[in-house]
Structures are given as structure tokens and as C-alpha cells.
Image (tube, rainbow, N blue to C red):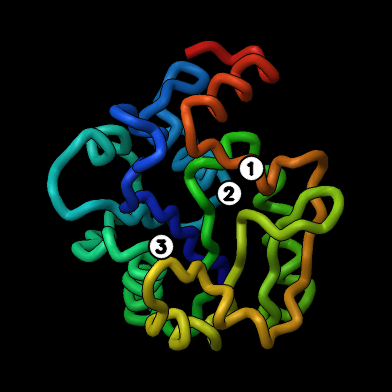
Amino acid sequence: MTPLIVIPAAGASSRMGDRDKLLEPVDGQTLLRRQTLIALATGCPVAVCLPPKPGLRRDAIEGLPVTQINVPDAAEGLGATLRTAAFFATHQDPDRAMMILLPDVPDINPSDIKLVLSTFENNGTDTPTRASNAKGRPGTPLIVPARLLPAFTRLTGDDGGKSVLKAEPVTLVRLQDARAIQDLDTPEDWTAWREKTGIAS
């Protein structure tokens, strides 16, 4: 059974000033829509966690075959978003794993995700599996086995799952360069990334 891919897009872009990093244009579309399409290209079911009120993030994924999950307490931190996602996943199917794909890591591609998926499946689907950079620094995506999802329903604050995974033997999948960890949180990050990649705004 393929994991449910969850894209946590409910948090605020607090370090971007008056801009929303998930609505930044990349390849002619918003980053959020682009990342959602990359997730869909794997053939896995996809759910996007969003703020509960209507807004441009919902508009960005309009028409895509994904489940939209409302996160009313997203201001609490990433833990609240992943907690809500884990509740959804376990109620949908308690035997299905959950992949967390952060939406602000634009260098990840479908082949990267499929490599993490195949590694997870080859290991027997019981071991947390996570992409890392070439030097082994953990990043995204992360696959959480079904057996650990009940613990994820108890996450709080800005805990992205570290408290659950610290006692687990996590399998790392090394991706080239910094693709797994290159997140873009500030206008300066975006400027540097656009200069490096040649992708204009």
C-alpha cells in the first residue's frame, strides 16, 4: 500500500514580510501548486494541510485531485499540522504510512520521492525513511510508518516529529547536493535560489 503524501501548508510565512513563500512563482505556477503536482506524479494519494479560512493557498491547488485538510490551530506550530494530518491518516486507514513532504523545498523532484518510497518498501515498510543531503543531514520527504502515527497525533508546538523519531532507527536516503534540505524561508533565500537556478520570479 502506497503511503499518503501529506503537504503541510497551514503555517504562516512569518519570515517573508508581506509575501507568502508558498505563493512564490516557480516554473510559471505557485510553489504550492508545483509541489502538489510533484507529489501527485508519484501516483500516491495526496493531502494538503491548509489554514481553515478561504484564501490564495486554496486557490493555488484548485482543481487538483487532493484532499484538503483544515488545521484550525496551525498557529501553534508544525506539530499541530502534523498532528491533524496523522489523525486524518489513521482514520482513513490505520495501516497506511504517511509521507511528509515540506512544500518549501523546491529542488525535490518526483524521482527523489520515488527513491525514498522504494527504499521504504524494500525495508519492509516498518522503518522510518527519510531523504537527506549528500552528507547525511536529514531533510524532506520523511515517511512515517503506520505504527508510529498514533504518536504523531500527540505532537505539540513546533515539533516536526523529532520527539517520536529520536528512539527510532531512521533509514536515510542520500540525495544529490542539498535538494532534501534547501528550504526557502526568507526573501533573501529566494533571491539566492533564483540566482543559483536561473528561475525568475
- Residue 164, compared with residue 31, is above or below; it is below
Q: Amino acid at mark 3?
A: Leu
Q: On residue 78, which mark appears?
A: 3
Q: Which residue is mark 1?
A: 110
Task: Give the structural element (helix, strand or loop) at label 3.
Answer: helix
Tags 1 and 3 in contact by the CB under 8 Å rule? no
- Residue 20, compared with residue 98, is above or below; it is above
Query: Residue drawn at (65%, 12%), measured in percent from left and top?
Result: 198
The picture places residue 194, in percent across and down from the top left corner, at 60, 18
Report the front residue among 15 and 167: 15
Distance from the alpha carbon under mark 3 to that under mark 2: 24 Å
Query: Residue drawn at (47%, 71%), measured in percent from left and top?
Result: 159
Task: Give the structural element (helix, strand or loop) at label 2.
Answer: loop
Q: Comparing marks 1 and 3, which lies closer to the viewer?
A: 3
Query: Residue drawn at (69%, 63%), measured in percent from left and top?
Result: 130
Q: Residues within 10 Å of mark 1 (few under 14, many from 20)?
A: some
Image position of 162 (left or right of 132): left
Distance from the alpha carbon under mark 1 to that under mark 3: 24 Å
Q: Which residue is mark 2?
A: 42
Task: Give the structural element (helix, strand or loop) at label 1.
Answer: helix
Tags 3 and 2 in contact by the CB under 8 Å rule? no
